[in-house]
């Protein structure tokens, strides 16, 4: 037979009952499936489709389900399409044999006609022709007493969604990655209780079940609680090859995929810029139909875990190329910042520019965990203020010590976020919800999870003439505002609809051990960079202080206070992004984080005149002839002449080839 286990009835492949001990995070789906299959009178579905990215646990879920069904003596048959090539005739004959003879295949089946016959087809979409055949023939022709359970990577699309009859007869279940709490429970069951180990594995895997199992197995094998993500290249390669099974062996397409692993989201324009040549629509269509690619509000994006592990894989294989792509990505977003007209796009471009500067603390605490999360923010209002008050009432009775690790797998750097019980208790005493309400309900932003529950809150206070009196008297904020001169205060006393700046007063989450919620709230502060004013924050927490400094905030002299305790100094930090200061800020930030967004060409290695060298550098940055002319204060005709000379000297025919040739000479700045 072409199918691995199709000749053995009610056989559960590669399953051991002790697997139940480590089966975490899928009980809800398992119970739903069991109910759908064992209570057919309550289920109108002829087919159940389980889908999710490779390694998400589809096969294990099916095996667990089959184990339960076997205890109830329900008959089932399993077909595994892995490795099956385009031989629909053999598939047809195999399936017909099963369906036509299912009553003889299983002893006792004829006495249990009130129970359905179950046909499991695993990995069904790994062979396109077989998948199409199942869709066109199997589903429409199966007997009424047979239920089919399909498992595959891709969500249903195309013809599956075109027919109302199919829509009503198919139940889909998407498997998602495990939560932080589920990862924590799994790691503890495997015998590792160290907080640092749990956080490392969370950052490594982002809740991807197969990765979690493999990396934990590495810990067990090495009898160690220490794990360096970059040293586990065999595991990384195994995972990447599993994901690449659906990617054609086309070097040009693989390079396009490599670029997309560096970007949080992408479109044809961005890929073409970084690729230094136009990406064809055919290539782009192939890319976005991969099972681990989704469409979001800023374009398309790879599953965050797959992006991370592929990113590390490609960086390991070709470090120089990886660095060049990263620089091109930063240069692309810098160019978009200065050419964008819409605020919404500008917020995104600035965030991505900062991310691609490559700072590990900023990357892991603001971006890497926030991407792909299902949280949302809800602005405070008269209608939901009771919920806000209840959140802080709950906080009053809960002031724990906690440590959260923000680990960056790419650099093996760990940043610890430590908060004492004393700090939390003091914060409870300092926060006056009723006073804050007088400044406007919208100073509160509630973090909502998928079920609509408030799981965190941020407090960001606008600075204008109405709020300044309170800011001068309120703990934590008063140290800054009371040091200002009359003239400096008058600058801040703008009308309420103008806003002179913002004071970030609080970032707080329920269940603070989970780093994702805090990351999301921090990430959602990025739009403040476009506020056109001053951004101020004051905190005694060391990781927050370091984060603010890495983001370019300056410590304010004379504004350190001791509102959190006599032995707890709390410095105040400010970032001024008024008017043209934003441009200077971004360039200074790029310089301070040691990643120049322009690609440096070695003068001694290139046969260019001084002016040709300037033009070449601007071409590599992605500027057009018109932009180069404006930058150098020359005419476009002059620029065209220089470009022609560059093409001739580099022995290339067009601009794309010129850029690629120049990139061969790129080296990092000293």
Image: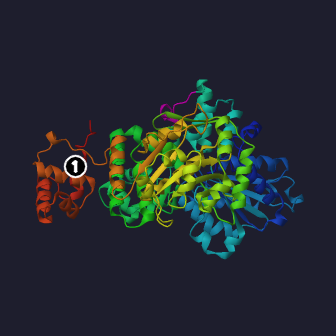
> Percent position (x, y) of residue 508?
62, 47
**Does the image show residue 77?**
no
Single out the residue that lies furthest toward the top: 223
Please name the colour scheme applied to the rendered image. Answer: rainbow
Image quadrant in which you'd find residue 20: top right
Tally the numbered discs.
Answer: 1
> Percent position (x, y) of residue 166?
67, 71
- Image vertical order of residue 145 relative to residue 72, above or below: below
Image quadrant in which you'd find residue 162: bottom right
The residue shown at (51%, 33%) is: 232
- Image vertical order of residue 466 relative to residue 614, above or below: below
**Residue matched to label 1:** 661
> Percent position (x, y) of residue 335?
32, 57
Please name whichever residue, 622 or 457, is drawn nearer the observer in this view of the structure.
Answer: 457
Would residue 232 be counted in the magenta stretch?
A: yes
Bounds of the magenta segment: 226-235
Find numbered disc 1 in the image and state the secondary structure of the residue it sits on. Answer: helix
- Image vertical order of residue 382 relative to residue 6, above or below: below
Single out the residue that lies furthest toward the bottom: 164
Would residue 465 be counted in the magenta stretch?
A: no
> Percent position (x, y) of residue 536?
48, 49
Single out the residue that lies furthest toward the right: 111
**Does the image show residue 548?**
yes
Which quadrant of the figure contains the C terminus? Answer: top left
Mark 1, residues whose alpha carbon is within 10 Å: few (<14), some, or many (≥20)?
A: some
The residue shown at (24%, 57%) is: 656
- Image vertical order of residue 611 relative to residue 148, above or below: above
| Majority secondary structure of magenta residues | helix
């Amino acid at each position: 037979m072409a199918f691995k286990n199709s000749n053995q009835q009610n056989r559960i492949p590669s399953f051991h009952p002790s697997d139940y001990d480590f089966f975490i995070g899928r009980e809800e789906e398992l119970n739903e499936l069991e109910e759908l299959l064992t209570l057919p009178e309550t289920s109108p579905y002829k087919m159940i489709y389980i889908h999710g990215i490779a390694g998400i646990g589809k096969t294990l879920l099916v095996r667990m389900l089959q184990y339960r069904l076997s205890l109830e003596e329900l008959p089932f048959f399993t077909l595994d399409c892995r490795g099956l090539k385009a031989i629909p005739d053999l598939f047809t004959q195999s399936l017909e044999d099963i369906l036509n003879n299912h009553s003889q295949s299983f002893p006792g089946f004829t006495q249990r006609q009130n129970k359905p016959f179950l046909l499991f087809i695993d990995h069904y979409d790994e062979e396109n022709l077989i998948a199409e055949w199942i869709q066109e023939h199997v589903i429409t022709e199966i007997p009424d007493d047979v239920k089919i359970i399909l498992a595959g990577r891709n969500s249903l699309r195309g013809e599956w969604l075109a027919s109302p009859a199919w829509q009503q007869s198919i139940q889909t279940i998407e498997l998602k990655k495990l939560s932080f709490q589920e990862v924590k429970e799994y790691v503890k069951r495997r015998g590792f209780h160290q907080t640092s180990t749990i956080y490392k594995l969370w950052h490594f895997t982002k809740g991807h079940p197969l990765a979690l199992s493999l990396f934990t197995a590495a810990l067990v094998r090495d009898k160690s609680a220490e794990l360096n993500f970059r040293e586990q290249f065999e595991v990384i390669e195994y995972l990447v090859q599993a994901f690449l099974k659906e990617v054609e062996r086309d070097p040009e397409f693989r390079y396009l995929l490599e670029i997309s692993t560096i970007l949080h989201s992408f479109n044809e324009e961005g890929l073409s810029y970084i690729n230094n040549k136009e990406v064809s629509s055919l290539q782009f269509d192939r890319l976005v139909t991969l099972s681990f690619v989704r469409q979001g509000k800023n374009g398309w994006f790879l599953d965050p875990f797959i992006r991370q592990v592929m990113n590390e894989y490609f960086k390991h294989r070709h470090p120089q190329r990886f660095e060049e792509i990263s620089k091109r990505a930063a240069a692309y977003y810098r160019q978009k910042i200065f050419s964008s007209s819409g605020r919404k796009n500008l917020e995104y471009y600035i965030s991505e520019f900062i991310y691609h500067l490559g700072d590990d603390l900023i990357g892991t605490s603001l971006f890497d965990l926030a991407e792909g999360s299902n949280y949302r923010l809800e602005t405070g209002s008269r209608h939901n203020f009771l919920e806000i008050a209840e959140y802080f009432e709950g906080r009053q009775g809960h002031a724990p010590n906690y440590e959260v690790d923000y680990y960056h797998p790419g650099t093996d750097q760990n940043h610890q976020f430590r908060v004492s019980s004393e700090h939390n208790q003091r914060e409870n005493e300092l926060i006056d919800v009723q006073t804050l309400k007088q400044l406007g309900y919208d100073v509160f932003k509630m973090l909502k999870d998928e079920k609509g529950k408030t799981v965190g809150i941020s407090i960001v206070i606008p600075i204008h003439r109405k709020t300044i009196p309170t800011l001068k008297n309120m703990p934590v904020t008063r140290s800054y505002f009371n040091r200002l001169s009359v003239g400096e205060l008058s600058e801040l006393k703008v009308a309420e609809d103008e806003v002179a700046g913002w004071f970030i007063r609080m970032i707080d989450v329920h269940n603070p051990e989970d780093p994702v919620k805090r990351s999301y709230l921090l990430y959602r502060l990025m739009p403040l960079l476009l506020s056109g004013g001053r951004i101020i924050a004051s905190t005694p927490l060391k990781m927050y202080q370091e984060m603010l400094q890495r983001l370019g905030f300056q410590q304010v002299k004379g504004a350190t206070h001791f509102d959190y305790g006599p032995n707890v100094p709390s410095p105040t930090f400010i970032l001024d992004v008024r008017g043209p200061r934003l441009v200077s800020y971004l360039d200074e930030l790029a310089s301070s984080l040691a990643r120049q967004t322009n690609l440096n060409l070695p003068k001694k290695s290139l046969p260019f005149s001084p002016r040709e060298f300037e033009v070449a550098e601007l071409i590599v940055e992605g500027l057009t002839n018109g932009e180069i002319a404006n930058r150098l204060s020359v005419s476009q005709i002059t620029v065209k002449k220089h470009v022609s000379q560059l093409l001739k000297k580099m022995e290339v025919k067009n601009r794309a080839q010129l850029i690629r040739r120049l990139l061969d000479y790129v080296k990092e700045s000293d």
